[in-house]
Image (cartoon, helix red, strand yellow):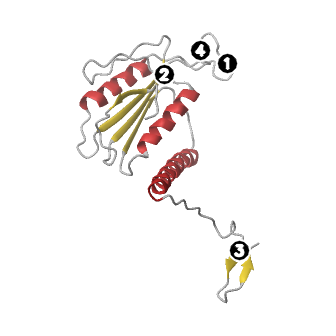
Amino acid sequence: MITDPALVFFDDTHRIDEPGTHVMIIGVGRYKFGKGPGASLVAGDLPQLTSPPISARAVSDWFIKEFQNRQKPLVSVSLLLSEDEPHSYAPPRPAGAAPVIPPEATFDKVEAAAKNWTGRLASHKDNLAVLYFCGHGYRMSTDERLREIGEILAAGLIRLRARRREAQAAGTGDVSLDFTARQSVHGRTLGGRRKRHA
């Protein structure tokens, strides 16, 4: 498994051929360009928050200690926090788990954690995804929101199909390529003569 600094819980006894639940939690309280030192002209009036990292830790604790789903048991929890001073997080299980300092919830680190999270999700077609975000919201129109959700789902589907093709190729040694008619150089007419596509 690829090392993921945001991973605060992972059940390595879970069978990969069975579905599970994968959780990604983000708590953003400190905004680099919000009110205070480093404020920008665009985001300078954005207040700093104290509750999101606290809430994110509580949600992580709940999933690790309390979440129950026999068909899709908890397999992984990722946690990213943005706060004034980084504080360690002690996962409630397994017993004696060492405290960790979750990565700061910057764009690059969230993007990297999301790629790892979606990679774990792609391990089984029936996995359950949970994404929790606490911080300032961003106002979007319904069309913008639907378009963004569609792009996220499409990216996940592409990753899942690629993973399936890799698994199939590993088992058979065969690789298939799909081309649309416009990408094809030659095709056959019903009479058997070759016809070049424009």
Q: Secondary structure at mark 3?
A: strand
Mark 3: few, some, or many residues within 10 Å (few <14, many ≥20)? Answer: few
Q: Amino acid at mark 3?
A: His
Mark toward the viewer: 3 or 4: 3
Residue 88 sits in which quadrant?
A: top left
**Label located before the other in sequence (3 or 4):** 4
- Residue at numbered disc 2: 103
**Label located before the other in sequence (4 or 2):** 4
Q: Nearer the viewer, residue 50 or 86?
A: 86
Q: Residue at x 43, y 35 (%)?
A: 1
- Residue at numbered disc 1: 40
Q: Secondary structure at mark 4?
A: loop
Q: Amino acid at mark 1?
A: Ser
Q: Amino acid at mark 4?
A: Lys
Give the Cα distance between marks 2 and 3: 52 Å
Q: Residue at x 39, y 19 (%)?
A: 54
Q: Secondary structure at mark 2?
A: loop
- Residue 186 is marked as 3
Above/below status of 186 relative to 75:
below
Give the Cα distance between marks 2 and 1: 23 Å
